[in-house]
Amino acid sequence: MKYFSTYIFALFLLTGCNNNNQQQASTQEATTPETTNPVTKTSELSAFELYVSTLEQIPLPLNHNPLGQLPELSNNYDKNGFANYKHVWTSQPLGIYFNDGETIGIIDCSIGDWGLVPFLTIYDKQGNKIDSTSFYKKSGGDMGYQAIEYLTLEANRHIIVLDTVKRWNLNEDESDIIENSMQQTIGRTEYQVLTNGMIEKQ
């Protein structure tokens, strides 16, 4: 009986110690603050990368003019991402012009008089805008004026825009053109996207 009482007492002590250790562990877990991830540049990068992942690569070289059609690309783009990163005048993305890991060029499109008009924006890898430009600065038609531009996006980040501009003199009340007064000019503008992401007009 004496040994039995000693056994029960020892068992009681062991059980109490285990319960106490478990309570301390539970208390420690409850009081240990959870680690949180503060909003940093990493989260901005992730958001930009998520948007970029929904865009398609543009097949190069790309040739286009305001009367032509652009390829059907990036139809499943992230609309929230586009709203955050788009060129201000555009309504939909076309796709990725280039991505070298440090800078990325994205073509967005606005709706023009004759069709979609491309705009180029260069970003750093965090999604910050470095530079942007449009290409169709002359295209259009009016009384005594007609112009069209031809865009080529090359794989080496070199861009060529050829233009043909026709002008006619107008009659005295400017209600019509004067026949045989047409003058035509042909122009060429070149751009180069530099390694720092700036667009240099040449």
Image: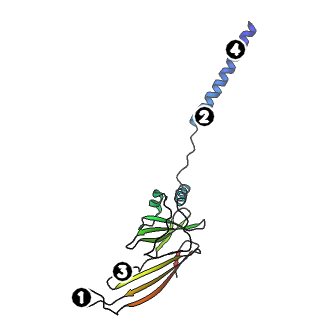
Residue at disc 4, secondary structure: helix
Expressed as whole percent of the image width and height from the top left, the position of residue 86 reads: 46, 64
How far, Cα to Cα, is label 3 from label 2? 76 Å
Q: Amino acid at mark 4?
A: Phe
Instruction: Work out whether mark 3 precedes mark 2 in sequence or the reverse, and give the earlier one.
Output: 2
Numbered circle sitting on residue 37: none
Q: What's the distance in space between the residues labelled 1 and 3, CA to CA?
A: 19 Å
Q: Residue at x 47, y 62 (%)?
A: 85
User: Which quadrant of the figure has residue 184?
Assistant: bottom left
Query: Which amino acid type is shown beneath numbered disc 2?
Result: Gln
Which residue carries the number 1 mark? 173
Q: Which mark is residue 141?
A: 3
Q: Earlier in the sequence, mark 3 or mark 4?
A: 4
Q: Give the distance between the C-alpha atoms of the residues marked 3 and 4, in whole angstroms.
A: 103 Å
Element class at badge 2: helix
Q: Residues within 10 Å of mark 3 (few under 14, many from 20)?
A: some
> Disc 4 to disc 1, how far (Cα)?
118 Å
Residue 12 image position (x, y, % from top left): 67, 17
| 165 lies left or right of 53 | left
Residues packed near mark 4 inside 10 Å, few (<14), some (14 to 19) or many (20 plus): few
For this orientation, the residue located farthest to the top is 1
Which circle, 4 or 1, is nearer the viewer? 1
Which residue, given by chain and number where applicable, does mark 2 sit on?
A: 28
Whether tag 3 and tag 2 are in contact, CB under 8 A, the answer is: no
Q: Is residue 126 above or below residue 138?
A: above
Assess whether mark 1 and mark 4 are in contact (beta carbons under 8 angstroms). no
Which residue is at 60% across, 31% downward? 26
Which quarter shows the N terminus? top right
Q: Amino acid at mark 1?
A: Asp
- How many neighbours does mark 1 have within 10 angstroms: few (below 14), some (14-19), or many (20 or more)? few
Q: x%, y% of residue 116? A: 43, 70
Of residue 111 and residue 103, the one placed in the foreground of this image is 111
